Image: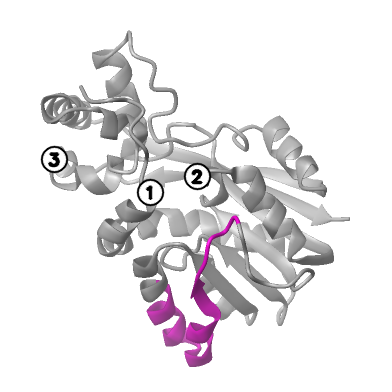
Amino acid sequence: MTDPAKPNDMRAHWERTAAQYEAEGDVFTSRFAEEAWRLADIAPGAKILDVATGVGALLLPALRAGAAAYAIDFSDAMVERARRRAAEIDPAAADRVSQMDGQALTFPDASFDAAFSIFGVMLFPDPDSGLAEMARVLRPGGLAVVGAWQSAAGAGPAVLFQEALGELFPDLEFGSAMGNRPLFNTNELMEAGFARAALETIAVHHVTRPWATPEPDWPRENAQLAFGWSPAWQALDEDDRARVIEAVETKLRSGVQIEATALIGIGRKR
């Protein structure tokens, strides 16, 4: 086993796996982004920002609904894919997708009617800074919408990964295997996060969706996509990683069913 304090280079991970995420991961996370858009009930023509857009899971429904949508991500590879997909809906929208740090937005104060971050801010090195920046760029009365997995282990195969770690290494402290900050995964924590950003909580919704169970050999072929950004995965040597993959494959062969629950929090700038 390697040093468990090894830094988590998340940006490099997403640069490596953006194409694979677009092909395999977005189909699941986009379901939650679309529901977040529906729950926020944003008026057509509103100016909105998608923070940590990935390949555009929230950006795309916003554009289809007629919003003046902007999006940022810290990964150039993700931005490239989000621009391409946005341009298929509105060619001008590609110019509104930018590479940017969500903890230090370059937009002026009070620029947007709504700001979203679906499974983004929860992974920032400083989630409170990310949420504070979302609040800063909102106009008074504007909405902040945050999505976070209810399980600190994440969702989909990541939950099986967390289980396998606990079974194989019961004496080791990994915390959340996927590195999620436990700031938004209960109603109380979501509300407290909004309060720190001077946002009034309007609602916290729990949204559950099925997650198609992958074939048993999927972890072996897709470990970097599924687990590569995890601090726990980075702390394992090759032999221990092989043991984890084998344990996850065993769980998949047992016919385990996977579903995921996300909290969608909606706050208003006072």
Q: Is residue 206 visible?
A: no
Judge depth for marks 3 and 1 and give the one in front.
1
Q: CA distance from mark 2 to mark 3?
A: 24 Å
Residue span colored magenta:
82-103
Q: Which mark is residue 10?
A: 1
Q: Which mark is residue 220?
A: 3
Q: Position of residue 90 (x, y in %)?
A: 50, 88
- What amino acid type should be assigned to the residue bearing mark 3? Arg
SS assignment at label 2: helix
**Which of marks 1 and 3 precedes in the sequence?**
1
Answer yes or no: do the residues labelled 2 and 1 have beta carbons within 8 Å? yes
Q: CA distance from mark 2 to mark 1?
A: 9 Å
Secondary structure mostly seen in magenta is: helix
In percent of the image, x 46 and y 68: which residue is there? 56
In percent of the image, x 67 and y 63: which residue is there? 115
SS assignment at label 1: helix
In percent of the image, x 12 and y 31: which residue is there? 238
Q: Quadrant of the C terminus?
A: bottom right
**Which of marks 3 and 2 precedes in the sequence?**
2
Q: Which mark is residue 123?
A: 2
Q: Quadrant of the N terminus?
A: top left
